Each structure stands twice: as C-alpha cells, then as structure tokens.
Amino acid sequence: MIQEFKSFIARGNVIDMAVGVIIGGAFGKIVSSLTEDLIMPPIGMLLGKVDFSSLFIQLAGDPATSLDAARKAGVPILAYGNFVNQILNFLIIAFCVFLLIKAVNRMMVKEEAPAPAGPEMRDCPECCSPIPAKARRCPQCTATVEPTESAA
C-alpha cells in the first residue's frame, strides 16, 4: 500500500496539480488585496466614502454603530459588503484564468487530425462523382459500375 501511494504521488500530474493549487492560493491573496486595497476604495469614494467591507444589515436587537460592534454584541447581521468584495475577487480571478487559458491555447501547436481510414475512392465513369472502389452502383447517378480489381 505504501509503494502504491509513492507511485501515485510521484506521477507528474499530481505534482503539477499541487503546484497549481499552491500558486492559485498565492494568486488568490494577490487578487484579494487588489480588490480590497486598490479597486474598492475608489468605488467607495465615488459612492460617498463607503467602505464596502463594513456594510451590513442588522436583523434584530439594538441598532449597532459598526459591523465590529454588532458582531461583539452577538446581534444577527447580514454582512453583505464583504460578500460584494468576494464576488469581485471571483470575477477578477475568473477573468485572469480566462486570459491565461486563451494564451495557452494560442501557443499550443494544433495537430491536424489524420484522414479517417475509409475505402479507397475512384470516379464513377458515368457522372465522375467520387465513389468507393468496391461500389457496384454509383449513389449519385445510380449507374451500375464494376468494382476495381484491387478492391475485389
């Protein structure tokens, strides 16, 4: 069982996935900082000096003056400002992944698919349409034709 686990871990795709998860976590922190520190403050300033991360709706109890005060008092709240930040984080990450995949697809060499293995073709003597070498009747003009010697 230990040997099986070692061979599983040593596979290239598992190691690649682990590196991707680690880099993705670091990239998520960068995008969170971008959203919270660079994008949301100007938007909040334009909307009347609003800090999105502190926006909340109090569901019950005495009115709280801030999100921290409501949380310390144990009052039920909907902290929708942080949710807005997380939606923006997601959209930025999704857009970056889209651009990355688009660039990788452009760089990949496209291999032409091999021609499907099919019957050898020849021309119908009556209508000159391509027909399989073993055909006894042309599907286009319905003329009776003899199969070629190599196909027989």
Image (spheres, grey):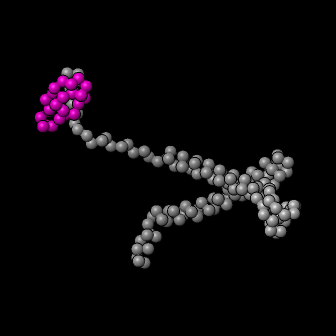
Report the residue at 13% width, 29% height from top.
Answer: 146
State the residue lying farthest toward the top: 126
The majority secondary structure of the magenta stretch comes to loop
Instruction: Measuring from the top left, give residue 117's x and y in whole percent.
Output: 27, 42
State the residue lying farthest toward the bottom: 2
Instruction: Measuring from the top left, give residue 5's x and y in whole percent.
Output: 44, 74
Q: Based on the displayed image, in which of its 4 quarters is residue 142 positioned?
A: top left
Q: Is residue 36 visible?
A: no
Indicate the quadrant containing the C terminus: top left, top right, bottom left or bottom right: top left
Q: Is residue 114 visible?
A: yes
Q: Based on the displayed image, in which of its 4 quarters is residue 129 positioned?
A: top left
Front residue of 10/66: it is 66
Report the residue at 76% width, 55% height from top.
Answer: 81
Report the residue at 55% width, 61% height from top.
Answer: 20
> Which range of residues does the magenta coloring cover?
129-152
Compared with 129, 86 (above or below) is below
Residue 150 among those drawn in magenta: yes
Instruction: Measuring from the top left, give residue 134's x and y in whole percent.
Output: 17, 35
Residue 81 among those drawn in magenta: no
Q: Based on the displayed image, in which of its 4 quarters is residue 141 positioned?
A: top left
Compared with 44, 128 (above or below) is above
Instruction: Measuring from the top left, give residue 29's x and y in whole percent.
Output: 67, 60
Report the residue at 82% width, 47% height from top.
Answer: 47
Image side of residue 112 versus residue 32, left or right: left
